[in-house]
Amino acid sequence: MIIQVTDLKKNYGDLQVLKGITTQVAEREVVCVIGPSGSGKSTFLRCLNQLEASTSGRIVINGHDLNDPKVDINKVREDVGMVFQRFNLFPHKTVLENVMLAPVKVRKVPQEQARERGLALLNKVGLKDKADVYPDKLSGGQMQRVAIARALAMNPKVMLFDEPTSALDPELVGEVLAVMKDLAKEGMTMIVVTHEMGFAREVGDRVIFMDQGIIMAEGKPKGIFDDTQNERLRSFLGKVL
Ligand code: ADP
Ligand code: MG
């Protein structure tokens, strides 16, 4: 298991957003997280990479217990790549510079080496020819593919995706999902919050249905999508499918 989460709780003041999440993710597994808006999906991902401190519970990533005071959170975070709904590329840097930045600044990778790897990653997401342009010349789908390449540049053990296609025009969704599918095929461990039920069904090894801060249902995609017993799951799927 590369990620183990035990009874994770997160409060914002009086609001309990995560009410005890327990789950594990195996190496090379693709877990898709679905559920209504406000159910705590983003908060869950943000706790996993420590953008948010959890209120209680235990998170172990790649053998590092995040509660252990001796753990170097920044090191753990380097193992966890994250791609958000909005692309957050640096506007005054070229596509390639965006991808090279963290390896050079954080990992002290030599420029030339970072450049070569950056170009290889851009090639992987189908954007090698855009290496020297600025983000404002890209479509949303292209920006999101750069964001994926940028996250991969740190050689993460796990990739977290928070609705990576939700802000895209419908015709651009497919190119981003295709890159994610390739990553999954190569064996990347992924947690993907998504409303793309086709992707969850086809690429997900497991689907987690979150509702009101808990895992309401969890299982193989077929079991989840064909579940006729769970009323809340049925109602949610009825709205999104
Ligand atoms: P989802 O991603 O499933 O839509 P979120 O994790 O974004 O859900 O939010 C879950 C709940 O937590 C919502 O009620 C939201 O308003 C609340 N919330 C999220 N972030 C914060 C924050 N920084 N401060 C206060 N409340 C927050
Ligand atoms: Mg969210």
Image (cartoon, helix red, strand yellow):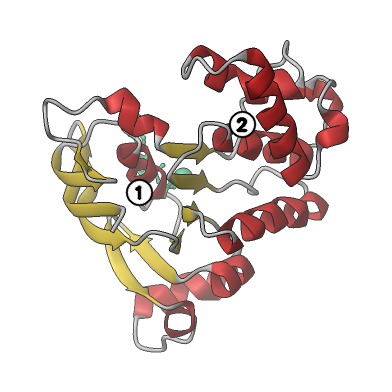
Res 170 quadrant in image: bottom right
Q: Position of residue 10 (x, y in %)?
A: 21, 41
Res 102 quadrant in image: top right
Distance of mark 2 from mark 1, alpha carbons? 26 Å
Q: Position of residue 17 (x, y in %)?
A: 26, 45
Res 141 quadrant in image: top right
- Can you say whether 57 is above or below 108 in the image? below
Q: Residue at x 65, y 26 (%)?
A: 99
Residue type at the position of mark 1:
Gly
SS of the residue under disc 2: helix
Q: Mark 2 or 1 closer to N-term?
A: 1
Q: Residue 40, which numbered label?
A: 1
**Which quadrant of the rendered structure holds the N terminus?**
bottom left
Can residue 81 be seen here? The reply is: yes
Viewer-closest of 114 and 69: 114
Horizontal side, residue 171 vs residue 214: left or right: right
Q: Is mark 1 within 8 Å of ligand 1?
A: yes
Q: Residue 150, which numbered label?
A: 2
Horizontal side, residue 139 vs residue 101: left or right: right
Q: Residues within 10 Å of mark 2 (few under 14, many from 20)?
A: many
Q: Residue 55, which numbered label?
A: none
Viewer-closest of 4 and 63: 63
Horizontal side, residue 206 vs residue 96: left or right: left
Q: Residue at x 60, y 55 (%)?
A: 183
